[in-house]
Amino acid sequence: MNVLARLFPNAPDARSWRGAGACLGLSILGGCAGVSPFATAPVDPESPAAQAVIAGARADTAYPKFSDIPPTPANPRPARDWAQAVAGAESAGAQLAAQTAPETWTLDGTSAFAARAQADVTPPPAITMSDTEAFARDARARATPPPSPR
């Protein structure tokens, strides 16, 4: 049975998908046409970094050889010891996470904490007017006026 597509408005139309795909493809290609990831970027030849890179690229350097690879250590740590070290680090991390979890502390009892802290501390001596005047006198003696704007 051949039914017209306009009788089913939600049926996908191949022509509209082709048009949308072509539009998307052209926009992607058009946006990327002028940009090449392999092109060299302009570099200021006067910058110290550019000079160092150019000097490093031109220098004839000795490349490592297979004979430069160090020999295998005589007594490497066995895999069992590595496993124990990893397990110890993981258990220490789990213990730290358990000790600092959100449910291990609360903000309850702040007035009792403040009362204990105030009881442990001796209050400073009271400030008298003569102390204030002596401080002001010393500050005036140390102060130097700014230079005149001539």
Image (tube, grey):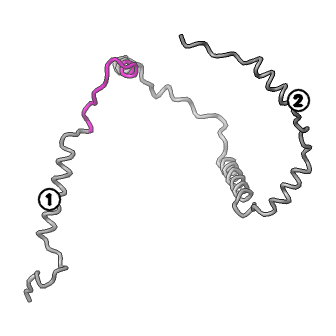
Which sits in the foreground, 30 or 36?
30
Quadrant for residue 113, please give it. bottom right
Residue found 87% across the figure and 55% down from its top? 115
Which sits in the foreground, 18 or 90?
18
Tell me, for residue 71, which label it has, or none. none
Which sits in the foreground, 51 or 133?
133
Quadrant for residue 10, please give it. bottom left
10 Å crowding of disc 1: few (<14), some (14-19), many (20+): few
Tell me, for residue 22, which label it has, or none. 1
Left or right: residue 145 versus residue 106 is left
Q: Position of residue 2 (x, y in %)?
A: 7, 86
Q: Is residue 18 above or below residue 1?
A: above
Q: Position of residue 23 (x, y in %)?
A: 15, 58
Q: Position of residue 68 (x, y in %)?
A: 50, 25
Left or right: residue 84 versus residue 50 is right
The magenta-colored residue range is: 37-52
10 Å crowding of disc 2: few (<14), some (14-19), many (20+): few
What's under tag 2, amino acid-wise?
Ser
